[in-house]
Amino acid sequence: MEALLTKKLFIGKEDCAWFYSGAETPALRGSLEAMTDYMNRRSVGPGGRANNAAIEASCKSNIALLLGGKAENIGLLSNSSEIISMIAGSISFLPGDNVVVNRLEFPAGVLPWLVLRDKGVEVRFVEHTNWQVTPEDIMEKVDHRTRLVIASHVSYLSGARLDYRELYKQLKQTDTLLLLDATQSLGAVPVDMNETDFLVCSSYKWLLGIHGLGILGVNPARVADFMPRSVGWRSVIDMFSPIRHSSYEFHHDAKRFETGYPSYPTIYALNYSTRLLLDTGIARIENHILQLGDELIGKLDAQGFTIITPRERQRRAGNVCVASDRGEEVSEYLQKLGIYLWGGDGRFRASIHSFNDSADVDRLMNGLSEA
């Protein structure tokens, strides 16, 4: 199976087999050119700032297209952890309220809620069954005091894909909000921001970007009046208002969550990479990832590995996870062979993206047979 995106688009991809996309993706040559453009424009004064604004608007439009939403409902912050913490700190919790999370969540999706326990907020954990969590599992923990459910579309730990659309359908019958973490899915499989209240995603994984941004999608259907407890000059409509020392008014769109300047080099790079993803087509990328995943899973099965990621295509995305108490050791050994994957948490994870091909899979399997 050939790669969907040629390896020539990336820096240094010719000499390695990259299955590390669940952690970060290799750098695109076009992103380097885009960041160089940003650096050059720093020297033209106000004109450079005007171009920054134009690229930012283009990037938000690209992200909105990927999410089936509107650019005005996209915010760009420093990282996804900051966004989750901001939302956690902006909800007016009362003692006895609760938040529902599950055991397959990345720590960034758990820690901000633990901080709230000293305010009398209960953190309810949903246990997994065979490394999967269903909407029904989550809803069993939801009651009239549940303020928010946070869940990942695709688990960093097991690679299982959650049916968040069904979950949101049920949550809309309640007053409980949904915060969906799409860090392990956006750029690899279709994601719809209209099927959650908040969406968060990192810039440097499946979107083929670099470090420096957290993406926030805000669905105004139920949270149009939701206001952050953090404020900065970019959050407000008129930062130079004559009454700015005594009053302020938030923007009415997702800008209200943006306190200050974002990382413009990252925006330039992400504007390029998201355009590349859109031109390639997310449906094509998903099909490529799942088909190559079938190939990898079949070969892992043949060698007797214990796969914890679901076999069914609709229940997984790019992450294929294998139970192993030697995960870190396997990862370190393969790295010496020019094969990059992530190991730890009782497993190792091979992440398949659009630039991977059957030759990469064969190289990985050869390496695993020796590890």
Image (spheres, rainbow, N blue to C red):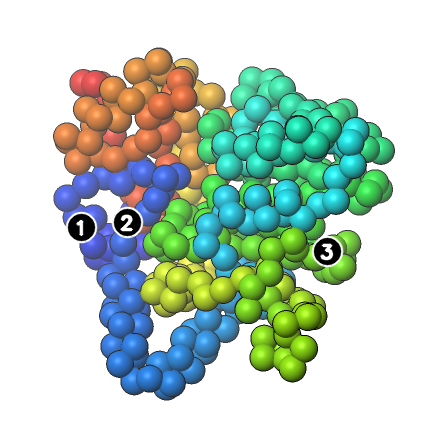
Q: Residue at x 22, y 34 (%)?
A: 339
Q: Residue 26's mark?
A: 2
Give how far across and how far down residue 15 sits, in percent: 15, 44
Asked if 192 appears above or below 157 in the picture, the reply is: below
Q: Could you tell me how many numbered marks the image carries?
A: 3
- Please name the residue that numbered disc 1 is placed on: 12
Would residue 135 be visible to someone looking at this image?
no
Give how far across and how far down residue 313 sits, in percent: 52, 35
Give how far across and how far down residue 320 sits, in percent: 41, 30
> Could you tell whether 186 is left or right of 257 in the image?
left
Depth order, front residue of 228/202: 228
Asked if 248 appears above or below 8 in the picture, the reply is: below
Asked if 141 appears above or below 64 in the picture, the reply is: above
Q: Which three-letter amino acid code belongs to the residue tagged 3?
A: Phe
- Please name the residue that numbered disc 3 is placed on: 226
Q: Residue 105 is drawn in which quadrant?
A: top right
Confirm or deny contact between disc 1 and disc 2 (CB under 8 A).
yes
